Image (cartoon, coloured by chain):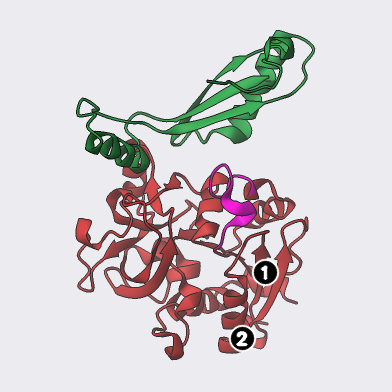
Chain colours: A red, B green
Amino acid sequence: MTLLAGRPRVAVAVFPGTWSERDFLHVAEAVLGWDARLVWHAEPELGPADAVVLPGGFAHGDHLRTGAIARFSPVMRAVESFAAAGGPVIGSCNGFQILTEAGLLPGALMRNDHLEFRCDWQWLRVERPEHAPAWLSTLTDGQTIRLPISHGEGRYVADAATLDALEAEGRIVLRYADEAGTVDDAANPNGSERGIAGIVNRGGNVLGLMPHPERAAEDDVGGIDGLWLFRSLERWLQEQPAAAERRL
Amino acid sequence: MAEVHVALRPGIADPEGQTIASGLRSLGYESVSGVRTGKLMRIDFEADDPVAAEATVADMCRRLLANPVMETASWELRAAEEMPANGAVTG
């Protein structure tokens, strides 16, 4: 039995102040025909899931630091176990911030260098998609995609040693760029170190990114490049015998 | 009571501090060469003795109050009776 016989099951974590969970739910159910479910942050279990989404918003009001309180929510223990077992996890915007606070990804997200909240369409250059196969396998190295960004605290920071290690290990998989794929200060919307828009963990299954793929999945909203990530997940799940077993 | 100061690590850009410095210079304080922002937290709690209090605050900082990626924490401990009656600094 393969996944082709079933639909991907996605658990979407919801914290007090999360605001993108309904967009993910809409895309998963109405656009992709997946089986999606919201999981309240106080739940200690995810339930049956092939992938986990940590959506954008302002979990727990982003008090103290973005994601700092959310990482202690009971559902995060389940997300950590799911990730440790190799399960695909995506954290977008606030979800990325939570993943860094939880230590599932290195670095931190800080106030944009210009201090403005930035809500715009943004070109991104894809790099080493094979290092994040669950989320980027349908993309090619150097390809540019256009996704919305919507954040006030998206400036990726880490110490030089961490940044060098991310570069050396090919774990910087999305950078802010222009349409031609040029990464420079002009294309950087928030002052992120080295133009970093998205990174992946060593296992290749946990992706954090500031942009919003769920806001670019239908022509009506101005773009469908977010579908690259969701189609990648579908393809990756189909290729996983272990995942197919879990669905029996 | 603990007064915890959370500061950005040296080298971490502080756009808020830069904006404040620029504001001060525009008011005529031309000698201002830099401002670094941070957080001040006053935490009321109970501990058996100063050693235990110290250990508790260190644990609070490590687990929640500061993110070691970009911040450092320092603190001062004070017994409650040393506090002003209204708990506030006036003036």
| Label whose residue precedes the other's in the sequence (2 or 1) | 2
Distance between mark 2 and mark 1 Cα atoms? 19 Å
Q: In the rendered image, which residue does mark 2 sit on? A: A4
Q: Residue at x 56, y 19 (%)?
A: B75
Of residue B24 and residue B56, the one placed in the foreground of this image is B24
Picture coordinates of residue A122, whole percent (x, y): 33, 70
Question: Disc 2 on helix, strand or loop?
Answer: helix
Q: In the rendered image, which residue does mark 1 sit on? A: A11
| Magenta-span inclusion, residue B47 | no
The image quarter in which residue A147 lies: bottom left
Q: Residue at x 39, y 54 (%)?
A: A171
Picture coordinates of residue A92, whole percent (x, y): 50, 63
In the current view of this chain or complex, which residue is farthest to the bottom? A220
Residue A232 visible to an observer of this rendering = no
Of residue A241 and residue A17, the one placed in the foreground of this image is A17
Q: Which amino acid type corresponds to the residue marked 2 in the rendered image?
A: Leu
Stretch of the chain drawn in magenta:
A57-69
